[in-house]
Amino acid sequence: PQGATRSEITFAPGEHIRRVDVWVFLQRINYLRVYTPSTSYDFGVRATGDARQNFVAPVGQQVVGFVGNCTTTALFALGVVTRPVLASDLRYGTGCATSLGNLA
């Protein structure tokens, strides 16, 4: 929204969001913390008497996006979008040499 500070997070390869905490004061989101497996990122300003709600990705899933409701000056609602963790591979050893090189 206009008047808000814009911040961006650059994730390392393989890093993902595992949890999001939202603090609410006077029916507006005033503070947000995004957790990855290795660190956390904070946005906004805490207020005395604010209340926290946390969104934890279910086992086997990761947070991949956000949906919300705002005006030009305030964020009123925020939800998270999750998906199953995508498969990955771990290579070890070396195969025989071929015309395409050594297979992993």
Image (cartoon, helix red, strand yellow):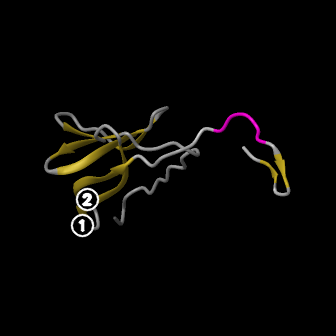
Tag shown at residue 49: none
State the residue in front, 59 or 55: 59
Answer left or right for 98 relative to 27: right
Q: Secondary structure at mark 1?
A: loop
- Secondary structure mostly seen in magenta is loop
Which residue is at a point 75% across and 47% down the rendered structure image? 103
* Rendered-image quadrant of the N terminus: bottom left
State the residue in front, 93 or 34: 93
For disc 1, the marked residue is 71
Q: Which residues are magenta?
A: 91-95
Residue 95 figure quarter? top right
The span from disc 2 to disc 1 (Cα, nearest Å) is 5 Å
Asked whether the beta carbons under mark 2 and mark 1 sit within 8 Å of each other, the answer is yes
| Magenta span contains residue 71 | no
Q: Amino acid at mark 2?
A: Ala
Q: Residues within 10 Å of mark 1 (few under 14, many from 20)?
A: few
Q: Position of residue 32 (x, y in %)?
A: 32, 44
Q: Position of residue 49 (x, y in %)?
A: 16, 34
Which residue is at a point 53% across and 44% down the rendered structure image? 88
Q: Amino acid at mark 1?
A: Thr
Q: Position of residue 50 (x, y in %)?
A: 19, 37
Q: Tally the numbered discs.
A: 2
Residue 67 figure quarter? bottom left
For disc 2, the marked residue is 74
Which residue is at a point 45% across and 49% down the rendered structure image? 86
